[in-house]
Amino acid sequence: MAYDDIDFSPLDALAGDEVVTHALVRDVRLASGRTLALITLDNGRDHTRPNTLGPATLAELGGVLETLATRAAAGEIDAVGITGKKYILAAGADLSDVSRLPSPEIAKLVAQRGHQVLGRLSRLGVPSFAFVNGLTLGGGLEIALNSTYRTVDASAAAIALPEVFLGLIPGWGGAYLLPNLIGIENALEVVISNPLKQNRVLKPQQAFDLGIMDAVFPAVSYLEDSLRWADRVLTGVEKVVRRNEPGKIERLTKWPIAVKVARGMLESKIGTVPVAPYRALDLLEKARGGSRDEAFAREDDTLAELISGDQFAASMYAFDLVQKRAKRPVGAPDKALAKKVTKVGIIGAGLMASQFALLFVRKLQVPVLITDLDQARVDKGIAYIHEEIGKLEAKGRLDSDTAGKLRSLIHGTVDKSEYADCDFVIEAVFEEVGVKQQVFGEIEKIIAEDAILATNTSSLSVEEIGAKLAHPERLVGFHFFNPVAVMPLIEIVKTPATADAALSTAFVVAKGLGKNAVLTADAPGFVVNRLLAKVMGEAARAVYEGTPVADVERAFAPLGLPMGPFQLIDLVGWKVAAHVQDTMTAAFPERFYANENFHRLAELSEVVEKDKGGRVTGFTRAAEKIAKKATGSSPVAAETILQRVQDGLAQEIRLMLDEGVVPEVQDIDLCLILGAGWPFIDGGASPYLDREGASERAFGDTFHHPPIRGIVHR
């Protein structure tokens, strides 16, 4: 069936309160005398509300393109261009509308409508030009791919096809058009690899180098340059070369090999639970042959299947948490109460302290002071920071003036009196209550009365750390995750004594650092480490019962976490993991497992062995000797291990809610998504545990009523 023969009225009826992105048209007379009809997509809002492509938007754009095709046939126009409002072409489909679709049949109409409308850009009877003037994601990039030619603004914020990250596929032509434009290996990177790397995006130059864009022009004269370039193309002066377009040899040989390798990589890195990456891979594989119509029909069927599934429903729940709840932290006091931070002090000059210093100086661009026990340690920390700034400069992420300014803002000393004018002081010292009490006791005598103290403890009691302070109300927990520059979460911990001014300052600072902050009570392990300790403890239990390490790692794969439990322990450090386990077993001995050998293993330089993909395959020989002394002879089945950790997590989350560690289960899910990489397709832990029956097994109920699921098939 042709797309124009389909009845889209059931989809159009759902437009409801959609913020329509209008397709505004004006004719542009080019230097050659030719006429280009320029469409500007604009939803009438400022740049904080991006253009999106909902049912009403697509219907309007479709009508405009139909009119332009008629004008082209009449000889009134020689080309069509499409661009966006300032800074934005389009951020893709309106996902809030997609997530509320009532049936699989209407879900399929979404795919078909996109193909009908965007596909018209290649069937106008005249060339079409996409002028990518800013943010271009998902369906926005597919507008460009359906066009004949593409230019990009050198300052465009991001270009990507992020659908796989959200449990979908590029379903408006992207899965077919992109590999046939830039080759299979490049397409695999854009469609699958980048979304699975925490939604990595392309910069304009990268998009040009890959062959997605035909030309790059500077922001100051972008549209004028693009129109001149389009005129040169129309007159034949400019020849467009598609250097990465796949030829016959690539289609016959490289294509199937690249897909096979990609499938193996997916299975090793994410397991087989996520559906969307494999559906995308199937579509990319089939894109090497057949017609465009056949390919678009495959995209229709696949997109309808995924929209109707549990993984997309869970992804939308997670997406909403990250896009809305994370930006309006529950429990954050009025930001007007925050103290203005004009200088930051960091106690310590080790690796963690140096990472803090680099982040604070880059994001806040205020003077940052670091101190340590001796000048040699301070000098080492300063050298590390300068080296990292140099690396950013070499990569072009900092210009020389900014790099020089940042270096000048960093100061290291052993003279603690220089903390006197710091507004915000954070410690990065040994994870021991007495040590933290001592350093804060010294600093409190120096700093101003209204200066804020912050502890980066991963699991200790913030209240106990501040017990000897003259003003414990100024102390707040400010728990980063490693690596500091990358992980987006900060757990802000409030004690019974913490003043609103200190809390407000912490939230404002976190936002200034580009982080998402979640407020937690002062409870053992806070949120993320408490639940990861449950995961790591159950893994250790299975090993000491006699299950091989590699088998335990595989048993945890259905959780969908970025890495297995022992790989995670190896990343955070065995000493840190041992300390967290000690904290949790001391607080809740009946629910958390720890083995005395944890600390002995932590003393080894290498504890686990890994394969080339980074997967843990077993203990090192030295670790085996330690582990065997306490290992049983009753291996546990993978299903049993998985159910134990599922039920344990469900029980612990329920108890955390009952204890008031956070206000709602959404805050726990947000913490796990941002701080532990819990996959979007699960929606965080709680929807996953509901679907797996763990909530019912653990406490006879579910976290969500009704549980978060996909479209109910009728």
Image (cartoon, grey):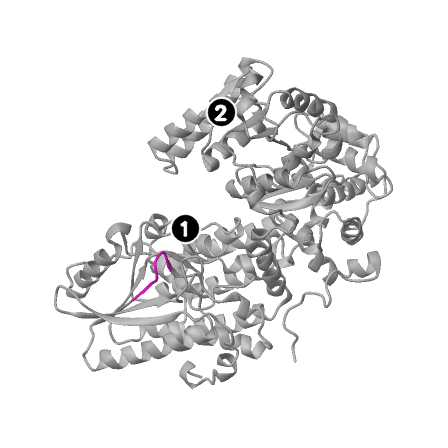
Q: Residues within 10 Å of mark 1 (few under 14, many from 20)?
A: some
Kind of element beneath mark 1: loop
- Please name the residue that numbered disc 1 is placed on: 202
> Is residue 664 found left or right of 406 in the rendered image?
right
Magenta residues, as a range? 82-88
Q: Amino acid at mark 1?
A: Leu
Magenta stretch holds residue 85: yes
Secondary structure beneath dot 2 equals helix
Q: Quadrant of residue 540?
A: top right
Residue in view at x 51 percent, y 33 percent = 360
Q: Can residue 273 be seen?
A: no
Q: Which of 505/85 is in front? A: 505
Q: Position of residue 81 (x, y in %)?
A: 27, 67
Viewer-proximal residue among 335 and 147: 335
The three-letter code of the residue at mark 2 reads Tyr
Spatial distance from mark 2 to mark 1, Cα to Cα?
A: 28 Å
Residue at (19, 78) in percent of width and height: 76
